[in-house]
Image: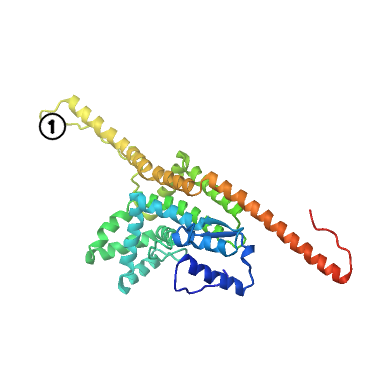
Amino acid sequence: MIGLKQVVSLTGRSLCDVLVEELGKLRMPLCNMSGKGFDGASNMSGNDKGLQQQLTDAGATLSLYFHCFAHCLNLVLEKCAETLPLVNDVFSTIGSMYKIMEGSPKRNAVYEANLNRFSINNGRTALHALSDARWTAKVDNLAATINVLPALIATLKELQPSDTTCEGVLVRIGSFEFLLQLLILKECFELSKYLSEYLQREEMDLVTAVDAVTTLIEAFSSLRTEDKFAKFVKAAKLKAAEFDIEDSFRDLGTKRRRCLRHRLTDGQTFLDATFSYHIATTAQSNASVTAQSKFRTEFYYPLLDLLLSEMQRRFSTESCEVLVQLSLLIQRTWMRRTLKRLENWQRDTAFQRKQPVESTHC
């Protein structure tokens, strides 16, 4: 970052004038600009009046415009949060918890007391207001919710008699499915956060950025297996046991089996009783499988499929390859110009000193 500048107009022409003026103060000529990364708004990306075209017309003729990779990644995650109802419900629940906890100092004091009660001193403990512009708040809230879930449940139980809104939130966050959703979303969003931070490094270039995006797509693809899903379920079971949350995916067959009645009710035959026992036992053994399969087909795979489709749509293989090739071409052109200027400078210096100089051509 070279600075922040307050502007009075957001048109492409006005933004270009401000940018050219600031670069001029730093003696950074537009002809040396190799790339322009903005969001997809028309005043930034427009082919006629957008900032990227205004800069090209002003002298940045060799610069390549591309939609900011970090912004594209933000759009991918926002798409998932808005499109999938179960994902949206997770963040809505976290938002409801934030409103309840931050609603008054008294409620916050109850929450702080429960943090001490469960000895939660490390990691994230504060929830943040969700923001469409700052999607990283979602990542932070997922990590914080998992870390302080026992304290949140205890707090809502204390506040429930005086606040009816706590009841619905309490039922939601006290479920095994919610805990599993938190763990899966945290994994996916943290992978994206690592990429976002990596893309914003000072030494980042298009070639490295494309490699980083490809790595994230491969990471999402690797999660789309039964083995990975089983690992998430196993982790959730361990957390559920630690947080005293009932495991709805448990093998109900390990519970005490139903026994066949010794006495028959009036009018009931032994065959009827045997059939009823078989039906009830089968329903018990299939309940956990049904719940797990439903979660897999309604949440896990739809989430990963949407992430992959959006990543491939916004970072298509063809587009990334074009960007890499153009970037390399621009770098070679810029290098040739730099070598030519260096050679001219050396010739001028050598002429003044009346010394021979060797050519710098490769």
Q: Is residue 285 left or right of residue 362?
A: left
User: Residue 9: x, y in percent?
Assistant: 44, 71
Look at the numbered disc 1 and give the secondary structure of its residue: loop
User: How many labels were placed on the picture?
Assistant: 1
Q: Is residue 39 left or right of residue 359?
A: left
| Residue drawn at x 27%, y 35% as measured from the top left | 283
Of residues 194 and 119, which is closer to you in this image?
194
User: Residue 336: x, y in percent?
Assistant: 72, 57
Please determine whether, in this image, residue 112 is positioned above or below residue 328: below
Of residues 139 and 339, which is closer to you in this image?
339
User: Residue 285: x, y in percent?
Assistant: 32, 36
Of residues 6 and 310, which is closer to you in this image?
6
For disc 1, the marked residue is 265
Q: Does residue 171 appear in the picture of this structure?
A: yes
Please determine whether, in this image, residue 298 is positioned above or below residue 96: above
Tell me the quadrant of the picture where the N terminus can be found: bottom right
| Residue drawn at x 74%, y 63% as measured from the top left | 341
Query: Could you tell me the amino acid type at mark 1?
Result: Thr
Q: Does residue 240 appear in the picture of this structure?
A: no
Picture quarter containing residue 186? bottom left
| Residue drawn at x 66%, y 55% as measured from the top left | 331
Way the structure is coloured: rainbow
Question: Mark 1 Cα within 10 Å, few/some/many (few <14, many 20+)?
Answer: few
Of residues 150 and 35, which is closer to you in this image?
35
User: Residue 105: x, y in percent?
Assistant: 32, 74
Q: Is residue 9 left or right of residue 258?
A: right
